[in-house]
Amino acid sequence: MEQTERKIKRLMRPTRFSKVQIIALSFVGIILVGTLLLLLPFSTRQGESTSLLDAAFTAVSATCVTGLIVHDTFLHWTLFGQLVILAMIQLGGLGLMAFSVTFSLLLRRRIGLKERGILQESVNTLQIGGIVKLVRRMLLGTLLFEGVGALLLSIRFVGDFGIGKGLYYGVFHSVSAFCNGGFDLMGVRERGSSMTYYAGDPLVNLTLIALILIGGIGFLVWDDLLKNKWHFRRFRLHTKLVLSMSALLLFGGAALFYVLERNGILAGEPVGKQILLSLFQSATTRTAGFNTADTAALGDGTKLWMAMLMFVGGNPGSTAGGIKTTTLAVLLIYLRSTLRRTKGAEIFGRRLEEDVVKRAAAILTLSLMLDLFGTLILTALEQLPLADVLFEVVSALGTVGISVGITGGLKAVSKLILMLLMYCGRMGSLTFALIFTENRQTSPAQKPTERIPVG
């Protein structure tokens, strides 16, 4: 009898969610509300309710700032539906917890230690001290950059679409680019055209590239740049790695894209347009989702290169997805250390912690497994080329949203798999795995060690 009472008490006890689980549930909440709103008949131009799967897919893609679509955003959704998508992009990009803290600050409510801990996990910072100030700067910076981006884009769009629509298009694409959302309204010109109409336009290209990079550089880097200006030596190691890897991937990615496509889609184009095309495709693979080149027309080598860039993605604590640049940097530094047979992995006069190397290896392993198994399952379900399936799967897990045009025609099961991959990508593959294991108790006892050969 007493044992039964104890079981009942355990069941009646309030569930204590971990910080990671609370963040995961906040994204689920946004997705559910967004799905319900997109199901409303006046969300579509046809005045008919969208299917539950397609509405949920769009909500997941917007909340996870991916950009993969099953319906053209302009042609299918009304202004109301587009605004719902835009709200999900903004909430998904910055995180619901950041907005809830903002409202608490406006209402002059005290931010407790628990809320600060959740914010720390959400922003992916190592310190809980000063987290509220960091979030305040993050939101103000977001408004500033999105506002300036909207004004610059409106210069072009007002001339093309008129004042009202031009300003709206400027705001929509600025938010979508900064949050690395990848949703666009260029179906007004041609279905699924993305930004190809502006492939040679320096204003549109450079503005979008700047928004993508600033949004994907990470809020911790913002804070470091604000404190130390451009004194590189004073930067934290994290900032040095982010800036170095971002520059390497941006310009290295553009150079290799040019080499691979100089006899392809770049052939016959003016030099200025070739440079813009190469730079934009390199920048957008940092999980932005726009494209100024016809992705389906790219060579298989270019698709593989872009898939590799999408796999890496942006930086920690940003609106971007992927395994992150610092993960790649840590693994390359550790590889160099192993090849040189030096003790410890060192860079910029600092030594990396062993736990960071283990975490980076875990992230790489989990992400590779998800990409490979996702590609395997979709290849078995769909009669599609392997290169196209791999590209779409990596785009989903990396929350990129660049597509070769196969998403809309996929089977229901395939769409569900992509939805799961997008959610995993937004949370982070390792963070997603920790949702199910974080509260488990581990034994302090350790087993005896034994060496085994590897490699």
Image: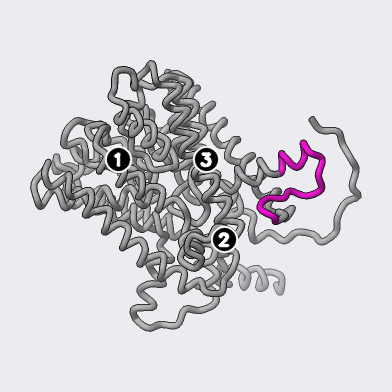
Residue type at numbered disc 2: Phe
Residue 335 within the magenta-colored segment of the rendering: yes
Q: Is residue 338 left or right of residue 394?
A: right
Q: What residue is at 12 percent from the left and 47 percent from the top?
A: 158
Picture layout, residue 269 above or below residue 343: above
- On screen, 83 above or below 415? below
Using the image as rendered, state which of residue 377 and residue 109 is in the foreground: 109
Which numbered tag is attached to residue 205?
1
- Image position, residue 196 (x, y; %): 26, 32
- Is label 2 in a helix, a strand or a loop? loop
Seen at 39% across and 55% down, the residue is 92
Task: Give the extent of the magenta segment.
Answer: 334-349
Mark 1 vs mark 2: which is more N-terminal?
1
Disc number at residue 235? 2
Residue 116 vs residue 283, the one in the foreground: 283
Quadrant in which the N terminus appears: bottom right
Number of residue marks: 3
Disc 3 to disc 2, C-alpha distance: 18 Å
Q: Position of residue 250 (x, y in %)?
A: 46, 39
Q: How far apart are the two marked residues, 1 and 2, measured between alpha carbons? A: 29 Å
Callout 3: few (<14), some (14-19), or many (20+) C-alpha neighbours within 10 Å?
A: few
Q: Which mark is residue 84?
A: none
Examine the rendered structure and indicate whether residue 446 appears above or below residue 271.
Answer: below
Residue at x 46%, y 66% (from the top left corner): 226
Compared across the picture, whether 40 is left or right of 12 comes to left
Label 3 sits on residue: 248
**In the image, residue 33 lies at what x, y percent?**
33, 56
- Residue 15 relative to residue 66: left or right: right
Is residue 21 visible to the viewer in this orientation of the structure?
A: no
Q: Which amino acid, by three-letter code, is at mark 1?
A: Asn
